[in-house]
Image: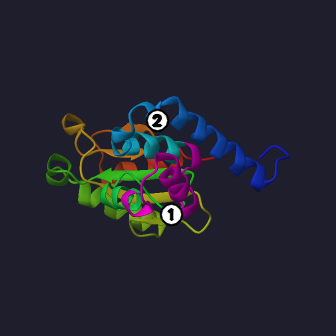
Amino acid sequence: MGGQTAAEVDTAKFDELGKFIDSLNINRQPDRRRGYLIQVLHRAQHIFGYLPESVQNFVAAKLDISRADVYGVISFYSYFTDKPVGRYKINVCMGTACFVKGAPKVLDEFRRLLGIKEGETTPDGKFFLGALRCVGACSLAPVAMVNDRVYGNMTADKVAGVLAECID
């Protein structure tokens, strides 16, 4: 945090999100407020790492929509999360191509080595493990992602090597 308090960091993050929302010129197109919601939530999750209640309330107020509408989108799309995730966000694709080519074994090995289930974060806050429906990289199936990096042609034998790359 570089000498800043947590409150100062949060204030800076809310300022950044507010400026982004203001840049969308939503007031010129009030009927499109809901249309901007996914774009705003993507940016908010990028800024905060997840979408806690305070962020959901902020987005709802800025877009002048209900928090229920905001939460409905967050709970529907698997990309969004309202819980803190680890520094390394690991997701295994469970789409048809990945599933058929062995993704369940890859996910099982991540579970075994990390000692957590999907949707959980390790106690040290380092790793989050999840499963996605499809990441759109079917030619590389099965696929795992660590943050924004895609690992194609994954096998259970490669999992330990992927985790080893996450050394601080």
Q: Which residue is mark 2?
A: 27
- Residue 95, given in percent of the width and then of the height, sits at 20, 51
Left or right, 151 with respect to 18, comes to left
For the record, the magenta segment spans 47-69
- The disc, 1 or 2, on the residue closer to the chain's N-terminal end is 2
Q: Residue at x 37, y 48 (%)?
A: 158
Q: How is the image coloured?
A: rainbow
Left or right, 20 with respect to 145, comes to right
Mark 1 is surrounded, within 10 Å at the Cα level, by few (under 14), some (14 to 19) or many (20 or more) other residues, namely some
- Residue 18, given in percent of the width and then of the height, sits at 59, 40
* Image quadrant in which you'd find residue 131: bottom left
- Residue 85, given in percent of the width and then of the height, sits at 52, 58
Q: Residue at x 37, y 38 (%)?
A: 150
Q: Residue at x 47, y 51 (%)?
A: 89
**58 w.r.t. 24: above or below:** below
- Residue 144, given in percent of the width and then of the height, sits at 34, 47
SS for dot 2:
helix
Q: Which residue is mark 1?
A: 83
Between the C-alphas of marks 1 and 2, the distance is 30 Å
Q: Amino acid at mark 2?
A: Asn
* Image quadrant in which you'd find residue 125: bottom right
Q: Residue at x 24, y 46 (%)?
A: 142
